[in-house]
Amino acid sequence: MKVVIDADLCQGQGRCFSIAPNVFGFDDLGNGVVLGDGTLTSETLKLAQLAMANCPEHAIFIEDDE
Amino acid sequence: MHKEPVTDFATDWDHTDPQWVNNPYPIWDDLRERCPVAHTERYGGGWFPTTHEMIAEIANDTEHFTSRQVVIVHNKNPELMPPAPIGGAPPITSDPPFHQIARRLILPAFAPGPVRALEDQVRALCAKHLDALTGETRFDAGARFARYISPGVISRMLGFPEADEDQFRDFVHLVLDLIDLPTEERIPLFAPMTDYFDQQIADHVAHPRDDFTSYLLNVEIDGQKLSPEHVRGTMVLTLVAGIDTTWSAIGSAIWHLAQHPEDLARLVNEPDLMPVAVEEFLRFYAPVTMARLVKEDMEFHGHDFKANDWVLLGFPAANRDPAVFKDADQFIIDRAINRHAAFGLGIHRCAGSNLARMELRVAIEEFIARFPRFTLDEDEPVTWAPGQVRGPRAIPLRVL
Ligand code: HEM
Ligand code: SF4
């Protein structure tokens, strides 16, 4: 499982990096970025899902492995 | 200006009507069920959609709706307004493609890192005003606490003298509250504000320093400095957007806690709950409603929107839409899933949201640390700011 942020949708609402600081960070403009390659463990998956459910712009996606 | 009271908000809404100002939520819930897009002939014609879906749709549709004028006034007078795409107060009055340029210039100043650096300052500011309340058992938390926090932060950020804070509140009042004055009376009132900003700009040109004003004066787009109008417009925006909004949010939170001892006790006992609680305060008492103008005649879900009609984007109404929020009309202090739109949606999403959240969190933390038990003083009235930024102004409290 991998998490990604669609940069065209993200408006830097900042919910993701406060809910899941181990999964998300932010760039100079305050927009959300995925830390590392976005691979999720069973623990970080829950937090990433919670962040996804709170992103007002629906900019976070969790992708199944191929 | 005398206004007729509203009898049906579906066909004649007015966001300055006393009923709306005092308690808009039942009105919005009713409109959402009945309309869900309300109309008015007031202010030269306008619309008020009430579902989260429609509000998000319009906020994201910059092709049909312009941000050129985001505060509703009586006389639209397009020729008096600075033209799109820049507008009078970039980036909030700007449309694409210029909007993105103006927004990127200011975002770094409000990113999480710089905001974190301000936290101690905000805490000290709160402590100063709380110290002044030591020993008092009945006071107005609006006049004595909530209203001081954001002007203190913003004036320091812009590099303005602290002593001028009362003037800033007058400027905000002018831009946001005095919207019922006829244009010919309103326009001259702007002169002292414009003069004040010009003086501050001149002072910063002569004595550059490490603040947001000097930053705006020096920053370049494609090798060119910003026009003086752009610098001033962004400074006015920072002042207006940064003061009333957060002041209202802090005030609403205190007003809520004064009436809900169980929520107050939880925050006092479970400090880790604060970030989640802040989001629920923002959802439930979202202070900011912003307008758009319709660019050209169009149809919107069966309604004939005419060019230059107002559209009032009720982000606070979106936050109470039961289609999106479970138990939307309940304040749930530990609501885990909360996709609220208090800071707007789409490209104009509040640039100051990190700062606003931090101020709100720190102000509540400090307030309840000093006053862990308080209630509303029923002998005195609570008053609400009218217009597009709504929050309590007088919050009479009794310390228990
Ligand atoms: C609780 C406090 C606040 C709330 C609820 C709030 C809400 C909003 C909303 C709803 C918008 C979108 C406007 C639109 O769509 O037309 C907005 C934009 C904006 N806000 Fe805030 N705001 C708050 C505090 C602040 C603070 C503290 C600042 C900074 C000093 C700030 C600066 C801005 C700016 C610059 C914009 C324009 C962004 C753009 O057009 O790209 N706001 N705010
Ligand atoms: S919560 Fe959504 S909009 Fe906000 S920073 Fe994260 S991805 Fe971007």
Image (cartoon, grey):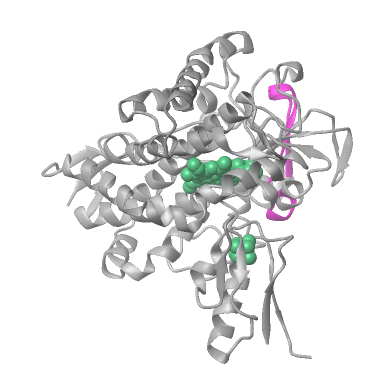
Q: Which residues are magenta?
A: B37-55
Of residue B309 and residue B62, the one placed in the foreground of this image is: B62
Q: Residue at x 63, y 56 (%)?
A: B321
- The image shows residue B16 at horizontal and vertical percentages of 56, 29
**B9 left or right of B45?**
left
B257 to B157, vertically: above or below:
below
User: Residue A42: x and y, percent?
Assistant: 57, 91
- Residue B72, located in which quarter of the rendered image? top right
Is B205 situated left or right of B104 in this image? left
How many marks the image carries: the answer is: 0
The residue under the point 25% across, 43% down is: B397
Quick check: B25 above or below B40?
below
Residue B217 lies in what quarter of the image?
Answer: top right
Is B46 one of the magenta-colored residues? yes
How far across and down, in percent of the image, does residue B218 sit? 56, 35
Instruction: Answer whether residue B286 is visible to the viewer in this image.
Output: no
Q: Nearer the viewer, residue B213 or B373?
A: B213
Confirm whether residue A53 shows in the render.
yes
Q: Quadrant of the N terminus of chain B?
A: top right
Ligand 1 picture quarter: top right
Query: In the orientation shown, which residue stands out farthest toward the left?
Result: B135
**Where in the figure is residue B3, as x and y percent of width and height?**
59, 18
**Residue found at x 51% / y 26%:** B177
Q: Is residue A27 part of the magenta span, yes or no?
A: no
